[in-house]
Structures are given as C-alpha cells and as structure tokens.
Amino acid sequence: MGVKLGILGLGTVGTGTVQLLQDAPGRHPLLQEIEIYRVGVRSLDKPRDVNLPSEVITADLESIVNDPEIDIIVEVMGGLEPARSLMLQALKNGKHVVTANKAAISRFGAEIFTTANQAGLYVMLEAAVGGGIPVIQPLKQALSVNRIHTVTGIINGTTNYILTRMQTEGSDFADVLADAQRLGYAEADPTADVDGLDAGDKIAILASLAFGGRIRLEDVYCEGIRQVSQTDIAYAEKLGFVIKLLAIATNRVSDTSELSVRVHPTFVPKVHPLASINGVYNAILVEGEPIGQVMFFGPGAGAGATASAVTSDILNLVAALKSNTAAPNPLLTCRHEDYSQIAPISHLVSRFYARFLTKDQSGVIGKLGTCFGNHCVSLESIVQTGFHGELAEIVVVTHDVREGDFRQALAEIQSLEAVDSIPSILRVL
Amino acid sequence: MGVKLGILGLGTVGTGTVQLLQDAPGRHPLLQEIEIYRVGVRSLDKPRDVNLPSEVITADLESIVNDPEIDIIVEVMGGLEPARSLMLQALKNGKHVVTANKAAISRFGAEIFTTANQAGLYVMLEAAVGGGIPVIQPLKQALSVNRIHTVTGIINGTTNYILTRMQTEGSDFADVLADAQRLGYAEADPTADVDGLDAGDKIAILASLAFGGRIRLEDVYCEGIRQVSQTDIAYAEKLGFVIKLLAIATNRVSDTSELSVRVHPTFVPKVHPLASINGVYNAILVEGEPIGQVMFFGPGAGAGATASAVTSDILNLVAALKSNTAAPNPLLTCRHEDYSQIAPISHLVSRFYARFLTKDQSGVIGKLGTCFGNHCVSLESIVQTGFHGELAEIVVVTHDVREGDFRQALAEIQSLEAVDSIPSILRVL
C-alpha cells in the first residue's frame, strides 16, 4: 500500500471512484498500490452503495485535509464552499489534489493553482470537463506543441439531450425539460445547465489550458437554450443545420490578441463533426497548427465515466510519486499566471440567423434590407415562408458580420412600424 | 539549450518535425529548451525544405546514435532496417527513443521494449498510430484505469479515402485507387494500405496497449478492400450500412481469455460513431468499463499532424528529463512481457453479409436456407433483388454466427448445382 487517499464526498462521483478503486484486477496494476485511507461525508448515517470500514468514513472533513498520513486529496463533493477552503488547506499541508469541481476551479483556479505551484504540488482536474473523455491531459501534453486557435465543445450533456429530443421528436423545450427532469437527466433547478452556466465554467477551464492564460469567469458570455423554439429547429433543418449549445474559445478575434470565450445555442452545419453528437454525449473539437482538427467524443457525465477521469488523475499522481521526481513535471502543472483579455460579445464576428414577424405589407423585405445595409450587415439568404395568424414570417441568414453592427441593425428594424417582433436570433457556425 | 535531439530521417515527417521545433513561439515553452543537434539523411545533396546548419546534417546515421552528447533519438526514417538496429543501438547507448515507425514497432516491439526497460529508458510512439490524434498516451494513461474490452479503429487514411469516394461517387475501386495514386493519397505500390497490412501493424500496437500483452503480428488477420465492389456498397446503403475498413481488437471472444485482433472491410451501421468518419480522417473508438465509449478523431497522416505527435512525445521526454526522475514513470514505459493468445479467425462470432449469384430456379433460396441450417447459421434477412444476365442475385445477412460454421455452410452452398458464385462475403459490425 503505497499511496494514501483522502476522498471528500461520497455522492455519485465519489461512490463511482471508490467502486473503481476497490475493483482493481484487469485495470492498471498501479491501482493496487492505492489505499482509500479516509472518506469524508456529510452524514454518517446515510446508506451507501460501497462497503468501507467504519474507521475510514468520517464527517470531519477538515481532519482529512489535515491528516499527515494522506498523500492525495480527492475532492468530489462539489459546490464552492467548503470545497475551495478544503482544497487550499490540503495544498498548504503538502497534499496533491484531484478534483472534479468545474465550478470551484473556474472561479478560484487562480488562488488554487498559485498555492499549488508555490508548494510544488499538482492539482488535477480531468473530470471537470467532458466527464470521462480525456481532454484536459491531451490539451496539457500532446496538443500543447500546437498553436491552438479554437476549442469548440458540446460540453453540457443535459442541454444536448434536450436539443436532440426537440430535434428528433418535434417537441417543445418546456415539455422535454420536464421529461428530462423526470428521467434524472436534468436537475430540479435546471438553471446551471439550460442557461449555459455549467458550459461556461467548463469552456473557461478549456480556454485557460488551450491559450495559457487565466480566464475571469465574468468575461465569459453565456446564453442558454430556453428561447430555442421548435420553429427555429425546423428552419435549421430546412437550411442544412442543427441547433447545438456550443461552448467556444478562440483567439481568432480580428486584429487583436484578445480571446472570444462564449456559450450560446448555434446553427451548426450538418456536415460539421459536432453536428452528429447527440443525446448526453459530449465532444470537444480542438483546432490548431499544425495538427488541423482533432475531436474527442464520449460520455460527458455519469458515475462510471467521471470515476474513470478522477481515477486516471489519481493514477497519474501515483506514477509521479513512484518515479520520485525531484521537481514537478512541467506538463502536469498549470503555471500560467497572466489573465487573458476577452473581447466583449459585441466584437464577435459571426454569421447570424434571425427570424422576424412582420405585418403582411409589400416592401417589408426591402425595409429590412435597408436597415441591414445601414449597419454594414450583408445577407446570405432571405426566406419568407408562410404566416403566423396575420403576420408574415421572414428568416434571414447573414454573412460574417460584427455582432455590435448586427444588434444595431436589429434595433433599427425593431422600431419599424411594419415589424411586429424578432422572436429568434441565433449565431451560425 | 537543455535537451539534444538526434533526428534520423528528413522525409515528410522529419521535415515537419524540424519545422515545428524551429518555430517555437506560441507553443509549449519547453520546446525552446530543445536543440536539434544532429539530423541523419540518406543523401547530403538533396534539396531540403528546412534550413539546418551544415554541421548538423550527416549521412552517417550510426554516428548519431553513438554520439554521447545526444539525449533523445527521433526515428522518422521508416522501414525495418536500419531503423531497428539504430533504435536498439541508441537504447544501448542510454538514449530515449521517439519513433513514428509502426512497421518496426509491430514487428520488433518485443526486442525494442525489452532493451528499453532493461536500461530504464523510454520508447515513445504516439505518431505510429492515428497520425496526430492523441491515442497512445490516453491508452497508456487516462484510459488504463478502465477494463478495456474493444478497440475499433479506422486507422488507414488511404483506404478510408478510397471507400468514401466509392460510396459518394459510385465509382469502382480500381478507378478511385488510380486517382488516389495520381493525387498522392495512395502509394505507387498500394499493397500495405489496400490489403490492410498497415492497419494490421497499427491494431497490433493498439491491442498491445489496450490489453497489456505482446501481439505476434502473424496472428493478426488482415483482409483488404480490393474485393469491395460498387454492388456491395449499394446493398450496404440499402440495408442501412456503410462499408469501412475496420481494425478491431477485442477480448470479447466467447468463453476464452483469447483476443481477436483483425482488419477487414465491414458493414458498419449508419448510426455507429465510426460510420460518419470520411476521407483521410482516422478515428479510434475505445470501449471499456466503466467509461463506456470514447472516440478520438483527427488527421491520420500528413506532415503537420504526424509532426505534432512526434513533437508531443519529445516534449513528454523533455518534461520527464526536466523533473529529473529517479525511476522511469511507469505510465510512460511499456512493461508487459507476455504474449496475448489470439483466436483464429474461424472462432470469430460475427454477423455476416454474403451475396450469391444463382441460376434462376425456384427453390434456390430454400436450398441456401437448408445449407445454412445444417451449420447452425441463422439468417436475419434474405434479399433477392434483380438479375445479373441470366443469374439471380441473392443477398443474406446472418445473425451472430461462428465464422468457421459460416464458412462450412458457404462451402456446401458453393457445391450446389444451382449456385454460380459467391462474389462477396463481408463481416457486419
């Protein structure tokens, strides 16, 4: 028994991790050198799906991070506090940390990694993004010889599940959400998922790794899927797209060294590799030079998949401890300390889809065209199809335009007497 | 200048690697600590796409592997000899090795890794499979906490390019091959690609990593795509499949501890993640417990992609050297020494597609059914569609059957007076 773990949390991920570690045959032989030394829980009385000696389980989490016998703290309790304080305390006590906590890392990463670096310790977070998909380690290692320019991910399984069902069944958002909640694919309070905040935490972490700078979470633009309607899904289909909630980080912001880091529902061309990622699956597409495109696909959540990622981080640390390094391996640490500059969303250059309801008058399309022209927005296509009651429905897809210009054009259009409303505005990949 | 490289070979991959290393800004900062100390070439006079000081280039490859100044040998010359001897000599001289040479590793891996392990050295081979796609490292590290049961890959870009064009254009194999040769996507002698041998080398390496045992290359069953006809592609389409050259390694061989390691054209259901991998792209699907399915997708060849993989291996070694380890990192070494037992192809249990040309007589389908029944082959569907001249064409898809039984049934069918020929037999995923 070489390496002693203190595990904080015995929920879905913690239980999956303990089950994996207790069932080592047929896996990497190094796992047999790991001892589950302490497991911290909120309630000692709760029935558990794993067998652990009673002396291993404690409700005193601080005693775990302060225990001098423990080499690695595995934080799988989630939430911001006390997770943050316990990780910091563990690092101050010389323990490496493995965490699945994207919320804490995306908010307190600067503090946590600074503390780790000062102490020559590792903080591993493979499970924080993409569940079981190995993506953090490839970004830190194999892909880091590339100049990465864009990371595009479907990294929230709940919203991808909802959008996939809306697309295949023709159902409305509210109905599918209710059903997803009933089936356990969405939380009772679905805000973090459906408003894009969970994907925002994750793309902040990926952007930080891909571009080697810290990201302020408040700079990440997040727009969720509540407003995606069946009408828009049908138009997407007709125009050769599917609607996906994409998280995007790119340094291809015109003429600046700024990054664009954002989450929003997006028209994705059907031929794009991400268009066919359906259900609760996640996928992350990394583009850079010289590699071109590489995509990682797999289960974005679930006890087993997440336990695989947590345990692979533990394995990496055990291997590092076994090889008895004099200095931390620079590919496992996270050493950047500067903050990346993030462009405001108004600076984004993108294609857009917009849907208008207008009075049934001749010349409306001409008026829309004039407004767009006034703000340098050139149109790729205009589709007028049918009526909603007495209103005509007009759909436009623009060429690449600056979002700020597009929004100004929309404001002008909104003020036209002939225009009733603009029910949908979506970015086009 | 911390770490000195000796690069063997300055062809496509060697040139790409030198270009990447000479253009470090914006990539991982550790690359700046690497010195291209010697580059070995066959001909000193050949014009090159990279600028290297004349004292760096030499035609004396042995002097490179014997040079005490050099820390890492990068073998990107390809071929079996002198690549094998030079790698062994480098290891005997205490140098780590990075190689892109799937042919040499799949044949001489036992000898090379034994030598490396005895000397406490690393042999890195990310570029040997899947071009730029990080797949070797995830198998060695992140995924090794799983019990992997199947690895399925599209790992030969040339054949995937040919099959994709046959499918989308309706062209015949010979025509597309000729065009691929003209465009540089296929070699003048296409044997290694189109007969599945290149994919066989690669799946042997993946199987070795996934299942922790050495693989004898002669145990790997290889069947290429020369016999795939437009008729079969059309039937596949009609039945809901695409035809892909798959390389498969699995331990799901009934009631034994044997592996099945094989390459063959395969009917792949259109909804399968590998069905939509087109053109020269590669993808590797790894399935295991608890992770489920994870897929890696990207460019399977090309100077830039392969250079990315080679350089990421170099980076890993530089990081290991920098952290000054007392013992090799057990996740980077390859320590298994036993050979895996491989089941003969006759033991495979699979669905099959077969196409028959028969005389236009009543009762032929009944006779086929009787022969299949005699050998415990149960059929999922029988399609009789049209005529070829005076012959009727009958297509069957079986349920899961043992290949040996299926072949015996086919032999009996072949002997029927009413049967003209069996132009196609393909396995169904």
Image (cartoon, coloured by chain):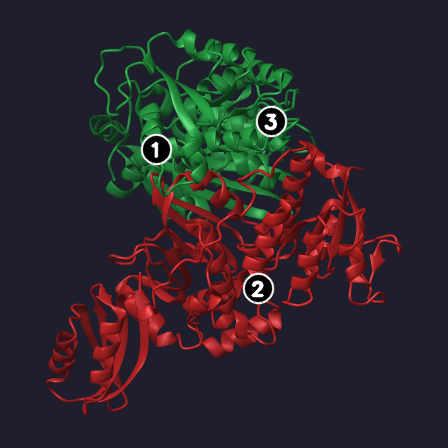
Chain colours: A red, B green
Q: Is residue B218 above or below residue B210?
A: above
**Residue nearer the viewer, A119 or B158:** A119
Residue of label 2: A103
Label 2 sits on a secondary structure element that is helix
Residue A342's spot in the image, x, y percent? 37, 62
Q: Is residue A9 left or right of residue A302?
A: right
Label 3 sits on a secondary structure element that is loop
Q: Is residue A381 left or right of residue A280?
A: left
Residue of label 1: B20
Label 1 sits on a secondary structure element that is helix
Query: Which amino acid type corresponds to the residue marked 1 in the rendered image?
Result: Leu
Residue in the image at 68% along x and 29% along y: B257
**Residue nearer the viewer, B424 or A94:** A94
Q: Nearer the viewer, mark 3 or mark 1?
A: 1
Residue of label 3: B333
Q: Residues within 10 Å of mark 1 (few under 14, many from 20)?
A: many
**Residue nearer the viewer, A62 or A13:** A62
Residue A23's spot in the image, x, y percent? 75, 43
* Image mark 3: chain: B
* Image mark 1: chain: B
Query: Which amino acid type corresponds to the residue marked 3 in the rendered image?
Result: Thr
Residue B420's spot in the image, x, y percent? 37, 26
Residue in the image at 33% along x and 16% along y: B56
Can residue B421 be seen here? The reply is yes
